[in-house]
Amino acid sequence: MDKYLEIREYDVQDRNKLIDILRMNVPKYFAPNEIADFKEYLDKELERYFVALVNGQIIGGGGIGISDDERTGFLSWSFLNPKYHGFGFGKALLHYRIDCLYNHSGVETIEVGTSQFTFGFYKKNGFVLREIHKDYWAVGFDLYDMVHSKL
């Protein structure tokens, strides 16, 4: 299988496919209640969201946002179809979003709230753990508050 990754802006027609892919990551990486949170995000809170595709098929996505003072960027709702883990697609999508944020004038740091199940991925990619909040997302799903600095 050719594994060419394409990243493009989210379109509302992608919504159901992304929800299906998120479900594939429950309960290993996301708590069941987070499906409703993701729907709410897509419908009402979305700033910018990117969709990852391989051979024209959606395999996942990830969002970004910027603080009001434009000095801090945020990563949100990052996930892939588990079948595509381990090929470097998650890393490519992460770095694409990091580049988008740092290319926006003024952004000095990027924050991400993740869990104990994926914080190692962010740590390997230059993020530093600031603090942990037990059972934040749901029972057994802790918040790992992490930051990445441009410098």
Image (spheres, helix red, strand yellow):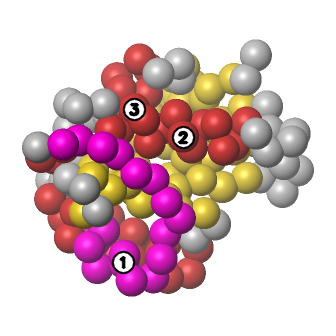
Q: Position of residue 19 (x, y in %)?
A: 28, 71
Residue type, label 2: Tyr
Q: Is 63 left or right of 67, judged from the image as shown?
A: left
What residue appears at the point 32 percent right and 38 percent down from the top-left corner? 89
At 20% across and 30% down in the image, what residue appears?
86
Residue nearer the viewer, 41 or 96: 96
The residue where tag 3 is placed is 91
Whole-number angstrom distance, CA of label 2 to CA of label 1 = 21 Å
**Earlier residue among tags 1 and 3:** 1
Q: Which amino acid lies under the numbered mark 3 shown in the image of this protein? A: Lys
Query: Which quadrant of the view contains residue 55?
Result: bottom left
In the rendered image, the quadrant that contains the N terminus is top left
- Which of the 4 image quadrants contains residue 65? bottom right
How crowded pointer 2 is (Cα within 10 Å; few <14, some 14-19, many 20+) is rated as some
For residue 3, above or below residue 45: above
- Count of numbered marks: 3
| Cβ atoms at labels 2 and 3 below 8 Å apart | no
Q: Which residue is mark 2?
A: 96
Q: Residues within 10 Å of mark 1 (few under 14, many from 20)?
A: some
Q: Is residue 126 left or right of residue 144?
A: right
Circle 1 sits in a helix, a strand or a loop, which is it? helix
For marks 2 and 1 on the same chain, the one whose residue lies earlier in the sequence: 1
Whether the magenta-drawn stretch holds residue 116 is answered as: no
Residue 96 x, y percent position in the rendering: 54, 40
* Quadrant assignment, res 140: top left
Secondary structure beneath disc 2? Answer: helix
Tell me the crowding category of disc 3: few under 14, some 14 to 19, or many 20 or more residues within 10 angstroms, Cα based.
Answer: some
Q: Is residue 134 among what the camera can see?
A: no
For the C terminus, the quadrant is top right
List the residue tagged with mark 1.
15
Q: Which residues are magenta?
A: 2-19
